[in-house]
Image (tube, rainbow, N blue to C red):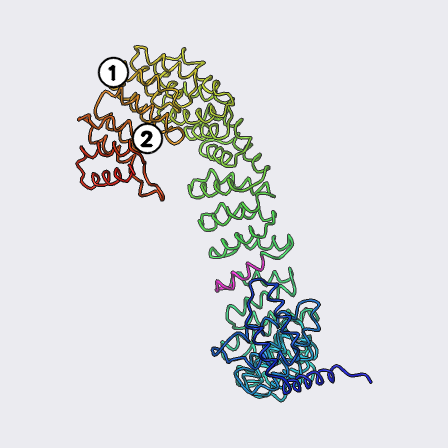
Amino acid sequence: MRIKDNDMNKITLTAAICVMFLGGSAFAADALELAGKLPMESMADSQAVLGEIVKLGPAGIQALCQKLAAPGEGDVKAEFALNGLALHVIRPGAEAERKVVVAGLMAALQAEQRADVKPLLIQLLQACGKDEAVPALAAHLGQGPVLCDHAARALAGIATPAAIDALLKALPASKAACRSSVLNALGELARAGKLKALPKDAEAVVIADAGEADLKIHQPAWRLLAQAGSLDGAAGTLAKAAANPNANEAAVGTAEYLVFVRRLGAADKAKAAAICRELLAARRAPGNKAAAASALVDILAAEANADLLALADNPSLDIRTSALMLAAGLKGQAVTAAWAEKLAKASPAVRADIAWMLGKRGDAAAAPALAAALKSDDPALQAASIDALGRLAPQSDQAVAALIDALGNADKNVATHAQAVLARTAGESISKALAQAAGKAQGPAKAALIEILTARRSPETVKLVLEAAQDGSAATKAAAVKAMGELGDFSVAPKLVDLLMRTQDAGEQEAIQKSLVMVANRSPDPQQRAQSVLAVLDQADPAKKAILLRALGRVGGDKALAAVVAEAKKDASDVQDAAVRALVDWPDATAVPALTDLAKTAPKPAQQVLAVRGLTRIASAVAAQDAAKAVEVFAAALSVAPRDDDKRAILSALGNVKTPQALKLAASLVKDQTVSGEAAQAVAAIALPNPKKRGDKGLRGADVAQALRLAAEVCKDKALKDKMLKHAAAAQK
């Protein structure tokens, strides 16, 4: 005899109940013992424990269910284990185990008397149950609103034809709150595509529910009709819902009506479009009108553009914005052409938004209209047109041309905005167009174009600026010089030297020197970096020679150093001063011998002071990379410093070098009464821990302790003196 599946489920359930009566306590003890082991340290171990619980059979599962506590009460071990089981048995290949767990859960649900525990069992069945669980769950659709809601949700979660059928069968008989739960569950199934169409008898019930006064009944009924109602049967009911005199209800009803209309559009596009237009024409909330426009676009695509054009004039900002957003997504040049025409005729309040939308569409056909709009006097429209043209520029020469033309706009805001957009818009073709335009441009536009090309790091720039730097306005020359510095290689150094020799303006000289240093430092050969300057140094008059010497001081190199030192020893006052200042600014320590000599022998006291300051600067600069070298330079500076103020400045800088050598040097001056205070301060700064650096314990050792005690003798700051003596004691241990 063949046993049907339903009969087998009954047999399994009955057997489980019988076993419980025979040996329930033993099963419970075993199940609880296993549950108490969870969670294990590893997933594999947890899976093994769950497998052992399954082996206890339906009776063991039911016994574990009996240990469930109401939410917020008692031991949660049983609930934790059962949740784990529900997940454990839905893995691939675990069908036999799943049936065992479901049988135990159904037996427990049938036997359970605690209303606050039953929802937990229903949720577990939802997680792992299939058709076999449907009868048990369906039986709870009529057991009060709470259990009905849980059971309806569970059946919707299972979502098999049997589960859907159970909900449909329960619909006519369900009461009040339970009716709402069943409607909501069926609505979720319809929304998920599991319930394609309501049976006629069920639809009749739902249509009747749609007219109920209770919104907890009629709103889910509307939702269900919108998703699964017949095209003929549901239309009138949903139209009535959309026309509800209550504004909030009308908003909900209209939203559901539009869900239905989208479905209708697949069968009858004209009828669906007509409904959308009726909703657009009627007095509706902006959100509903926007939704109707969206539905119309979904149904008609580009054919809905005329409707969107009309909505662009709507007084509601929300509706206008929605229309423009929808228009942005429509395809076809005909759509672009219509909106381009609209741009020219629309009210000032709308034109900027239309320009933005045309840019978002990305259709190059809009470029002429946007270029024309850019010439308006409306700042908002100008700004929107510039941004839109920037979007079109990669595929539109006309858009690029319009933006370039805007660089010469008398309104600085317009010109600056166009410049920023051109600078950030990618595309090699754009760079070429900018370079061509720059070659012909004049005045501020030329300077702006050079700045744009520089920002774009365009290779066309260097050739252009070599020409632009010769002529043109001060702004053009400044842009060209900056571009050469940022983009040029060593080959443009002679051109910069030539410019440097020609200019009389101090600001221009400074800018050229800066760019010259940048390109000189790109030479792979350090000895060649100053070549272009040295080539003209001897022929230059004193004023130009002074300028060239300052440039050499920033470029550096052995040949440059020799030339500068030679000039520093000559009698020409202005040239000599420039040479000394060049040595003071020298980029590395190679100038130390020359500066030391100058500090001793320079004919002017001011030059001696400058030389000492140069030594101090170089020492501070190299300290991070070579502390020993830094101390050596500091010592040289101290040995030749002509004034006590210079020694104090040197000691202050020396305090930043926290090495034993630096400490020894500072300590050597503690007995010098002219700088003893500064020397003591330097000793403290070098030896004591830096509170701003975590883990810094300061210098240690007997020499450190001795230096600190020596410095403490002359220190007038009691707090600092105490710190030095305390650290001296610790340092000697």
- Mark 2 or mark 1: which is in front? 2
Q: Considering only vertical position in the picture, is 507 above or below 245?
A: above
In the displayed image of the protein, which residue is found farthest to the front?
Answer: 733
The x, y position of residue 148, in whole percent, is 58, 84
On residue 675, which mark appears? none
Q: Is residue 597 magenta?
A: no
What amino acid is labelled 2 in the image? Pro
The boundaries of the magenta stretch are 314-327
Local packing at callout 1 (Cα closer than 10 Å; few below 14, some 14-19, many 20+) is few
Local packing at callout 2 (Cα closer than 10 Å; few below 14, some 14-19, many 20+) is some
> In 3D space, how far apart are the residues under numbered discs 2 and 1 (Cα atoms)?
36 Å
Residue placed most toward the observer, 615 or 321? 615
The x, y position of residue 79, in whole percent, is 55, 75
Q: Would you identify the image quadrant in which residue 160 lies?
A: bottom right
The x, y position of residue 589, in whole percent, is 38, 22
Q: Would you identify the image quadrant in which residue 128 lies?
A: bottom right
On residue 604, which mark appears? 1
Instruction: Name the residue carrying label 2.
Output: 660
